[in-house]
Image (cartoon, grey):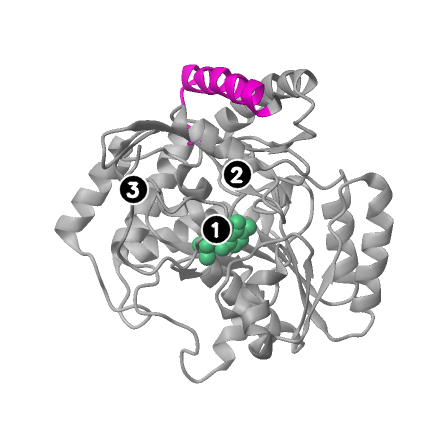
């Protein structure tokens, strides 16, 4: 199984992943095939990004039409019609959750780009450079978000000398009892008057699908605003239906000031967005020149891909489907957890689900599933959580097949 990838620099080698890795070559829907012809059911979906599955026919058609029209314009100087259409579309979608007075966006190529734009917006709007982030949270690894990465200090340590020292960390509550302590620690930081932004994942994604207690997001938003800081909702993983909600932060009543989207937005193409109210985004226009841009941000191809992704999500009612299928899958997994105590907890929402194996190796379970033809990933600070983020279009029968395979792996795992 699998051919060794022996060219290129691997920057993300995990100590416990064998060198003999799998190399993918083609995919369709929820299936992905490697260069040796092995076919897998894709429950990883490009780290949660392939909401529509691979090569969705509508998305493919739009991509092909856009390729025939225009694949690059001139950024902020002379934008493409596709980019403008996407900004209008995102604005209409996000305005109701950003105070209802419209929304403006800064497009980027990655989740890291969206977070960087949000952090910069907060500095411009508040004049404060302090940031509060959460332990266990992940916002990307480019220099802006890196300092706010609470997931693993190992990501930050090699670059400690260049870290943004204005970031402090608060604990992400996992039980109602922890909410008060977490909010109190955040309040202490906010009282310094130095904090301009609090970065919040409505569910810790890479952190292991950790769902905060009910009411935490709303209380956090209230606290942050009482101290004149901004709440940045990082919905790069949870947003656009992955968590069974279009915007989970809105459902949690966080009253976010800035909303970051990425991953699934482009239907497989690299594009992200940071959205805020026009009043908030107007702080950018104080400058005499454009002070934040990049060559390919909002490229016509990615913008058209994002519009078609939003169309398909709406037409196929995939947000509701994610909530429905996710609830069913959670029930099945809870039953399995009762049978196999190696599963300490089943967590998540919609089609982002984590199986917490405690100190047991989730990587070993992931590899056992891979051999059985199912692709998953791991998360959590110690990679102790098996993460399942299938395409929102996945067939129930494929999930049933995975549950059978999981049972076989767990029998093997537990013996
Ligand atoms: C919640 C969250 N924010 C930000 C990012 C960074 O996105 P990217 O890898 O596209 O830079 C990720 C990536 O996993 C994420 O899960």
Circles 2 and 1: CB atoms closer than 8 Å: yes
Local secondary structure at mark 2: helix
Which residue is label 1 attached to?
Answer: 14
Q: Residue at x 42, y 57 (%)?
A: 110
Query: Residue at label 2?
Result: 363
User: CA–CA distance between discs 2 and 1?
Assistant: 10 Å
- Are dots 2 and 3 in contact, CB under 8 Å? no
Which quadrant, please, contains the C terminus?
top right
| Label 3 SS | loop
Q: Earlier in the sequence, mark 2 or mark 3?
A: 3
Q: Is mark 1 within 8 Å of ligand 1?
A: no
Nearer to me, 135 or 222: 135
Q: Is residue 362 left or right of residue 262?
A: right
> Magenta stretch?
389-413
Q: Residues within 10 Å of mark 3 (few under 14, many from 20)?
A: some
Give residue 3's quadrant in the image.
Answer: top left
Q: CA distance from mark 2 to mark 3?
A: 18 Å
Q: Is residue 232 above or below residue 356?
A: below
What is the quadrant of the N terminus in the image?
Answer: top left
Rendering coords of residue 401 (x, y %) = 44, 16
Badge 2 density bin: few <14, some 14–19, many ≥20, Cα 10 Å: many
80 left or right of 199 in image: left
Earlier in the chain: of badge 3 and badge 1, it is 1
Alpha-carbon neighbours of circle 1 within 10 Å: few (<14), some, or many (≥20)? Answer: few
Q: How many angstroms separate mark 3 from mark 1 (CA)?
A: 16 Å
Q: Residue at x 33, y 61 (%)?
A: 9
Q: Which residue is mark 3?
A: 23
Asked if residue 106 is positioned above or below residue 211 in the image, the reply reads below
């Amino acid at each position: 199984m699998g051919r060794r990838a022996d060219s290129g620099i691997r920057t993300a080698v995990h100590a416990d992943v064998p060198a003999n890795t799998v190399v993918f070559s083609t995919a369709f829907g929820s299936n992905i095939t490697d260069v040796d012809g092995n076919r897998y059911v894709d429950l990883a979906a490009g780290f949660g990004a392939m909401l529509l599955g691979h090569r969705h026919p509508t998305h493919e058609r739009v991509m092909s039409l856009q390729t025939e029209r225009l694949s690059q314009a001139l950024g902020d100087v002379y934008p493409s019609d596709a980019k403008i259409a996407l900004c209008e579309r995102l604005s209409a979608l996000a305005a109701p959750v950003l105070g209802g007075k419209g929304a403006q966006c800064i497009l980027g190529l990655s989740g890291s780009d969206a977070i960087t734009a949000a952090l910069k917006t907060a500095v411009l709007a508040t004049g404060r450079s302090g940031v509060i982030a959460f332990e266990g949270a992940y916002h990307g690894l480019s220099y802006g978000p890196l300092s706010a990465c609470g997931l693993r200090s190992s990501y930050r340590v090699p670059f400690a000398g260049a870290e943004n020292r204005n970031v402090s960390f608060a604990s992400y509550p996992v039980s109602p009892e922890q909410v008060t302590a977490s909010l109190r620690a955040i309040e202490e930081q906010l009282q310094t008057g130095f904090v301009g932004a609090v970065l919040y994942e409505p569910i810790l994604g890479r952190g292991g699908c950790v769902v905060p207690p009910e009411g935490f997001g709303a209380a956090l938003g209230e606290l942050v605003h009482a101290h004149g800081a901004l709440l940045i909702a990082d919905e790069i993983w949870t947003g656009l239906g992955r968590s069974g909600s279009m915007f989970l932060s809105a459902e949690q009543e966080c009253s976010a000031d800035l909303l970051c989207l990425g991953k699934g937005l482009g239907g497989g193409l690299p594009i992200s967005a940071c959205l805020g109210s026009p009043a908030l985004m107007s702080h950018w226009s104080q400058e005499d020149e454009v002070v934040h841009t990049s060559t390919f941000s909002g490229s016509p191809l990615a913008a058209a891909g994002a519009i078609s992704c939003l169309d398909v999500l709406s037409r196929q009612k995939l947000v509701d489907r994610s909530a429905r299928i996710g609830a069913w899958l959670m029930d099945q997994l809870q039953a399995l957890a009762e049978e196999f105590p190696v599963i300490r907890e089943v967590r998540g929402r919609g089609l982002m689900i984590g199986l917490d194996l405690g100190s047991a190796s989730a990587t070993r379970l992931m590899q056992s599933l891979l051999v059985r033809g199912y692709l998953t990933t791991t998360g959590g600070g110690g990679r102790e959580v098996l993460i399942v983020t299938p395409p929102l279009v996945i067939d129930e029968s494929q999930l049933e097949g995975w549950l059978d395979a999981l049972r076989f792996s767990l029998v093997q795992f537990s013996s």
